[in-house]
Amino acid sequence: MKPEDLAAQLGCGVHTLTDIMEQLVRPGRDPRQDAPAPILRSDVLKMEDLAEGMVLKGTVRNVVDFGAFVDIGVKQDGLLHRSQMAFGTVLTVADVIEVEIIKVELDRGRISLRLV
């Protein structure tokens, strides 16, 4: 069956169907492995080095309903909640973005971020 016919039958786009078919051929492969490494700063190596108001570049590692998890170069990914993004902002895995640290909770291992 042609991909165009199958996509029409399933009610999805040809590109989406092609992506799904490619992933079915390679089960267990995580597409996030191809994402670029975070841009590291020499003065930020661990959560204790973070401070509120600090602006960093990071790589989106996962997108969820309530926001996105961003790798900013420390052990723990930061959460960029959807309330901290402009309305209509669309992020995808592997996007490199600029974020501001709005809260660091060392005891809970949480980093809250705002999109700059």
Image (cartoon, grey):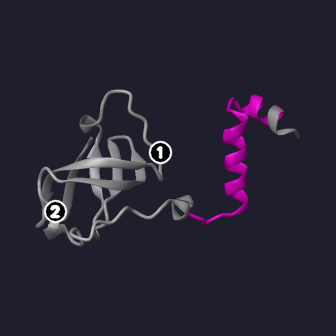
Magenta span main SS: helix
Residue at 88% across / 40% down in the picture? 1
Q: Position of residue 18 (x, y in %)?
A: 73, 45
Q: Nearer the viewer, residue 27 or 101?
A: 101
The quarter holding residue 24 reads: bottom right
The residue under label 1 is which amino acid type? Thr
Q: Position of residue 86 (x, y in %)?
A: 30, 30
Residue segment shown in magenta: 5-30
Residue under pointer 2: 50
The quarter holding residue 4 reads: top right
Is 10 magenta? The answer is yes
Q: Nearer the viewer, residue 5 or 59?
A: 59
In three-dimensional space, the C-alpha distance between marks 2 and 1, rounded to whole angstroms, equals 25 Å
Mark 2 closeness class: few <14, some 14–19, many ≥20 residues within 10 Å: many
Residue under pointer 1: 92
Q: Position of residue 107 (x, y in %)?
A: 11, 67
- Mark in the foreground, 2 or 1: 2
The residue under label 2 is which amino acid type? Leu
Element under disc 2: loop
Is 9 magenta? The answer is yes
Q: Measured along the vertical axis of the image, is residue 102 above or below residue 2?
A: below
Q: Nearer the viewer, residue 24 or 76?
A: 76
Residue contact at pointers 2 and 1, CB within 8 angstroms: no
Q: Position of residue 63 (x, y in %)?
A: 41, 47
Residue at 83% across / 32% down in the picture? 5
